Amino acid sequence: MVPHTVFRAVIMGPPGSGKGTVSARITATFGLKHLSSGDLLRANIKAKTELGLLMKSCIDQGHLVPDGVMSRLILSDLRGLGRTSWLLDGFPRTVAQAEALDKLYSVDSVVNLDVPFQTIKQRLTSRWIHLASGRVYNIDFNPPKVAGLDDVTGEPLVQRDDDTPETVTLRLKAYQTKTEPVLEYYRSKGVLETFSGTETNKIWPHLRAFLDKKLLAPREGVA
């Protein structure tokens, strides 16, 4: 299904809430262009663009990428899309970034995945990856055929440094501090829609039904 009019959305949720899986389903079902801030960040660093070098410097020093730099990166890519329906993932993460986005585009919907932190901790600390391919396994619901080894290559799986229990707790606290105000920002604008649950497959039908209605409803004033 492709929207008849331009539809612009943001997906939000804590790390490990299933944003990647849900984003893939939204883009496949509704034909939206998916823009991930993480993917853009890595691509610019790899290509050694001016912004990429600046962001790498921040990351290497253990600093957060400044709001202005992240906004320039994302908004530059959005301009290149023209009048296209899109789904933003990982941006905005601060109110300043949300305000920068609002100056150029009207956001039709902000989808918030509300997954209990305890569920996320269990999910992330059970996650193991095959570094070379990026294949992800979960001990609880998607285990490898042989414990500790990749199904395809048989090579050892590793746990990311940011998936250890201590780091996951810190990441979730950081999300609360930095991103909760963004949810309030969009709630005040009347575009925030929250979907709660512990399993992506149970959240998805409700989210799809919501988007079906949004995309079929006549809308005016698209920026």
Image (spheres, rainbow, N blue to C red):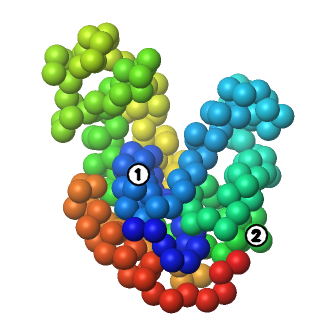
Task: Pick the residue in front: 29 or 198.
Answer: 29
Q: Residue at x 55, y 87 (%)?
A: 219
Mark 1 surroundings: few (<14), some (14-19) or many (≥20) residues within 10 A: some
Residue 168 vs residue 33: left or right? Answer: left
On screen, residue 59 above or below 106: above
Residue 200 vs residue 109: left or right? Answer: left
> Horizontal and vertical percent for residue 59?
69, 31
User: Disc 2 versus disc 1: distance between alpha carbons?
Assistant: 25 Å
Residue 31 showing in the rendered view: yes
Q: Which comes before the other along the chain, label 2 or label 1?
A: 1
Q: Identify the element where label 1 is drawn.
A: helix
> Horizontal and vertical percent for residue 105?
70, 71
Q: Residue at x 72, y 42 (%)?
A: 65
> Horizontal and vertical percent for residue 211?
40, 74
Q: Identify the element where label 2 is drawn.
A: loop
Residue 177 showing in the rendered view: no
Q: Which residue bears the numbered disc 2?
A: 104
